[in-house]
Every structure is written in C-alpha cells, then in structure tokens.
Image (cartoon, rainbow, N blue to C red):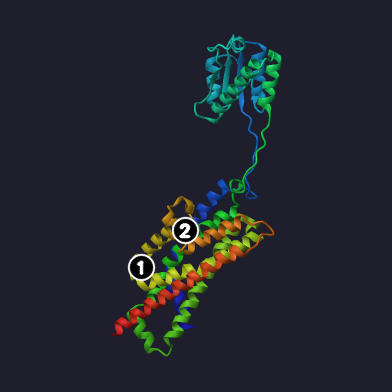
Amino acid sequence: MQVYRTFFRILRRHKGYVVLYLCIFLGVALIISSSHASENGRKTWEEVSYPFAVFDEDQTEMSRGLVSCLEEGNEKIEAEDDREMVTDELYERNLVCVMRIPKGFGASLLTGKEGREVEITAVRGTAYDETFRMLTADYIQLIRYYLSDGCQTAEAVEKAITEVRAKTPVSVGEESSVLHGRAYYFFLYLPFILISICVAALGPTIMAFQRQEIRYRSRCSACPETRISIEIVAASVTAGLGLCLIYFLLVLVGTGEEVLSFQGILYSLNMVSFLPAALGITFLVGQILHGHSAIVMAANIIGLGMSFLGGVFAPVDYLGEGLAKAAHLLPVYWYTLGNNWIDHYMPGDSLSGLWQCMGIEILSGAALVCAGLAYARSKIQAKTI
C-alpha cells in the first residue's frame, strides 16, 4: 500500500483548497438557506395589517362606508391633521398611508360628477400606495354600479362594503408553494464544491504520479502498473468519501436534525452517487493537464461551466433550447434533477425516478474514468512508438 499512503502525503500539501472551498460555500449556503428556507420547506401565507390615517371632511354615509372598507384588515390610527407631523409619521413608518376625503365626495358619487377625488399620500410605487388606491377605486366603482342599478344610498353602501370585505379563496400550486428546506440549499451547490475541490486538490496529486520520471521509477519497482493504478483509484475514492463525510457533518451542523431525516438520507445518497462523476472529471483532467496553476484554473472553469449548464445556479428552463438539450449530457444536470426530486418527495412516492438519476450519475463517472484511461493508454503508446 505504498502508493496509497504516498497519495495522501501529496494530498496534504493541497488541503488549503479543501478548507477554502468548504468554508466559502458553507457560508453561502448558510446565508441563502437562512433567508429563503422555511422550517418545513413550505411557503406560508399571513395577513398583513397596514397602519393608516384618514381625515374625513365629508362626513356622509358614502365617506363613512369608505373608511369602514379601509379598516377591514388594516389598522386605523388617530392622527393630528398637521401636514408636517403627518410627513414625519410617514417617514418613520408609523403610518404607511394618509387619506383625505374631501367635502362633497358623497354628493359627487350621487350625481356622477368627477372632481371630488380622495387624496392619498403614500410612498409612490410601494405596496401600501397600491393597496389603498385599489381599495378606494373598488369601493367607488361598486357604489356607482349599485346606484346606477337603482339602489338607495344606504343599500349601495352596504352592498359595496360587503363586496370589498369578501374573502377570495386562494390556492397555491405545488411548484410555487415550495420554498425548499434548509438541507436543499446545502446540497444544491454540491456539484460545484465537489468538482472544484476534487480537481484542485486531487488533480495535482494524480498528476504527480503521471510524471515521466515517476513512471520510469515505478516500472523499475516490484509493484506492477496495474496495482499502482488500483491503489491510486482506491486512494481517490477514499479521499472523495472522506470529503463527502466532512461535508455531511458540516450540513448536520448547519441544518440540525433535518439532514438525519429520510429526505436527508436521500440527499446524502445523491451526493455519493455524484462522487464518481467528480472523480472521473478529476482523473481525466489529471491525465490531460500538466502544471498546478493549469489544474486550478480548470477546476474553476469546469465547476462553473457545468454548474451553470446543469441548473445549479439557474434553472435549466432559463437556457436556450439547444443548451437545455446539451445539459442532459452532463452529470450535474442529473444530480440537480435528483436534488429537486428529493425536495418534492412525499411519503409514499415512488423512488424509481431518483434511482434513475443516481444511476446516470454513476455511469457518467465510469465513462469519464474510461475516457481518462483511454487517453493515458494512447499517450503511452505514442511515446513507445
């Protein structure tokens, strides 16, 4: 096991890249998950009450009906009719909207004349401004409709208030209701982390065994080349599994018991299934490139490129049709697909789709290793000739 132990001696020199990438992306995952994730991964709806003030100069049945509508779901604040004081209250967000109902407002609705509009003071373009303008416009439109339909003033006001206060049933679609759990965001960026760390740390280690002088010495030793290759592969797999274990422990610290649930186990299996692809990319890069700086550059380019095309940083649907089809050839795409599938998993769902994604990830890794072996073989044959 001399080659196996030597592999880890060389790997220790590049442990800085492992720590750097893990710290950076763990911090990113913590920030994103804390701001976008909910406790149970589902979006919740809650009613919002806006504090507002209204100065009713009309004091008619029409104006009082409008105030009654505005009070539904909002908080009416008694304020002094002083422009400077009102401005201060709006600035400090003690009030979000101030309304003034002019004298003659009710009479203008009865006669159908314009010119007695409600004065609304709020920050333009905000939700507060839009909300109170919409409520006011709806009330006025309903009053005019019921008056034109032959209703008396009291009846029109009562019907308008009923309509404005009516609660509309809202249903949220499955896709739009999912906020994702905290574990989802930690495992979402794993392909970039795993590819970057493996290529930047394991790549130079594998490359060290490909140097011509090292290969000549290995041929002179009693250890056959087949055994050397097997020990290098075994060491790479051990290092990769160790990296996955470290990342799992970091996710455990960041998410608590969530990663120990059944979904958390599926996330971890998907991570381990992607490991062969990351190691395959590393092995191929280690065979092709020479030089530590070139390998580190390749780690960032390959990690970013595959992550963008595979749907890590942006959904694949945002890409063009051609790029979306090309993304199916990347193992990152299938990892992301499996990650989304796990996030939507409900007890009792079939796991066949997830097993398919994991199987493609493993086969992609095997194909990349075979490509690296074929390249190494062709390079040796070329030197022999």
Q: Is residue 153 visible?
A: yes
Q: Quadrant of the C terminus?
A: bottom left
Kindly indicate the quadrant of the structure image that contains residue 308.
bottom left
How far across and down, in percent of the image, does residue 182 sit?
59, 53
The answer to whether 206 appears left or right of 108 in the picture is: left
The answer to whether 348 appears left or right of 357 in the picture is: right
User: What numbered label is drawn on residue 215?
Assistant: none
Kindly indicate the quadrant of the structure image that contains residue 119.
top right
Q: Label 1 is placed on what type of residue?
A: His
Q: Residues within 10 Å of mark 2 (few under 14, many from 20)?
A: many
Q: Check the image and name the residue furthest to the left.
A: 385
Query: Which of 231/178 is in front?
Result: 178
- Residue under pointer 2: 310
**Which residue: 56% across, 14% down?**
82
How far across and down, in percent of the image, does residue 33 sit?
56, 50
The mark that comes first in sequence, 1 or 2, is 1
How far across and down, in percent of the image, does residue 146 sit?
65, 18
**Which residue: 39% across, 69% down?**
285
Above-or-below relation of 317 to 126: below
**Which residue: 50% across, 77% down?**
234
Instruction: Please tell me whether mark 1 or mark 2 is closer to you in this view.
Output: 2
Query: Which of 232/304 is in front?
Result: 304
Q: Label 2 is placed on what type of residue?
A: Gly
Q: Secondary structure at mark 1?
A: helix
Q: Residues within 10 Å of mark 1 (few under 14, many from 20)?
A: some
- Residue under pointer 1: 292
